Image (spheres, grey):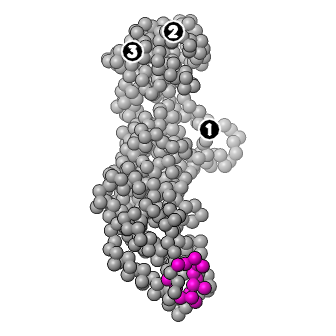
Amino acid sequence: MTTEAQQIIIDAMTGWSGDDEIMPSVAPLLSLQGPDADDRADDLTEAVIRDIQDAIRDRAKLAGYIGWTIATLGGWQRVDDRYGLRLTAALIAASFWNIGNGFWQKVEECYPVHPELIYGLKILSRGVKADVVVPSGIPHYEREILQGLGESEARGDWRELIRRTSAFQNRPKPPLGLIAAVNGLYQLAPDELTSMAGQVDNWFDASALISALRTADFLTLASGSTNDHIRFAALEDVLRNRRQLSDAETEALARLFDKMAESPDEWRVWLTVFNENPVAYPHIQIALGKALVGCDEAGLFAYVDSVKLSCGQVDGRSEIAACLQEFSTTAASDRLRLISHYAWRRWDAWNFASSADDEALAQGTSQLDYAVLMWLGNFEKKCSLEAEMRSTEAKIALLDNEWHPDAGALHREISRLIARWRTYAHALSYGDRAAGTAFVQSSEMPGPPMSRLHRSRYGSPTDKHSK
């Protein structure tokens, strides 16, 4: 639906005076009786769409149709609608009227008590399930994908499960009437929907259920549920649809992360789903930073441990920095000290992959640079920074006196020492601005002071501190 059409509907709902008028194409279909009534959803959908299109420029008529939908839903009685045709038709229409959840607010305003409607919405919402069919003759590898998905889900291996779900890109949405039923239940009786969601026992059905809701709404549903299938389905949907989140969606995702972090052990598992490759998920970093503010010590340490220190072929420093910048805006000083010191300790032990015989790992950056510089620039004493720089300079001067297995090992060692010196030099130069300026090219530090011999062997021609 176009933005213009949405605005027309909003205006019609705002100007509604209480009149109601049944849609002309829908009316004949409501008189159908017998078993065939169960197969009329497609016909009702076509009729609703046709009548809305015909009346889209007639706001008075649209307001009448909206009024009929409100009256039908608010006053619905199961004994008067044995085959559910009126309820289905009204819900299909509601799926067009419900822009920003305004329609259901109007229903609740006009019909504050609606137990029969809640009953009908619950019955229909239970029908929102994935129709998983395995036809005969499918390739063996496709059967293996389904089998592997079921096995990883059964043991709660969410890291493996998200890899498996990527094979299912084309996911049909539920029919419009069922989508409206779930949205109506979410608005009118959210506890009932949360209870229903708690009974879902597989990802396919969980994914189908949350697909009926807007992103902020299904994230709210997931944060209110203790069902990990629902939580995973909500998180997987956000990760798969890589788009910038609205403020409401970001807040809802942060609340879901808050719930996941309540158990340190489970939080570590969830972090493996989305934080091992942060560059793939830049859109969740603000929400993650907000959630970290509420984490206890174990939760903060779990976050740091989940970050791969080496940038490798993909540099996720900017994403980690975005998360920690958000965390820094509201976290207390003792929390900043806690997470940054733990990050520095891990970085210090790692020492630019000093235990790995791989030149690609011996580079001058790590994905925890922001947190490391937060510690060094904000909390470490200036004299300690200077002492570490002098110690590193001394190690560089002694390189030629030490034994190295080969030229490659020597190159890796000098690269590590220069990178370490530059990190401390950056913190010393910028102080409490060190973390924030880490990715500004103009703030890049020169190499450490070297003799002419060391400069010619190891240093850059642009080093400014050579002797």
Task: State left or right for residue 457 relative to residue 309.
Answer: right
- Distance Cα–Cα, label 2 vs label 3: 20 Å
Secondary structure beneath label 1: loop
Looking at marks 2 and 3 on the same chain, the residue that comes earlier in the sequence is marked by 2
Any mark on residue 170, and which?
1
Residue 271 locus on image (x, y percent):
44, 55
Give the number of the mark in front: 2 or 1: 2
Q: What's under tag 1, amino acid-wise? A: Asn
Are dots 3 and 1 in contact, CB under 8 Å? no
Q: In which quarter of the image is residue 412?
A: bottom right
Residue displayed at 37% across by 25% down: 188
Task: State left or right for residue 384 relative to residue 205.
Answer: left
Give the camera-side residue of 361 and 44: 361
Secondary structure beneath label 3: helix
- Distance Cα–Cα, label 2 vs label 1: 37 Å
Residue displayed at 32% across by 74% down: 381
Residue 102 locus on image (x, y percent):
42, 23
Give the camera-side residue of 223 and 77: 223
Secondary structure beneath label 2: helix
Return the residue at label 3.
74
**For the stretch drawn in magenta, what is the main secondary structure?**
loop
Return the residue at label 2.
61
Residue 308 locus on image (x, y percent):
49, 64
Q: What's under tag 2, amino acid-wise? A: Lys
Q: How crowded is mark 3: few (under 14 residues within 10 Å), some or many (20 or more)?
A: many
Looking at marks 2 and 1 on the same chain, the residue that comes earlier in the sequence is marked by 2
- Distance Cα–Cα, label 3 vs label 1: 35 Å
Residue extent of the magenta highlight? 449-464
Residue displayed at 61% across by 48% down: 145
* Magenta segment includes 450: yes
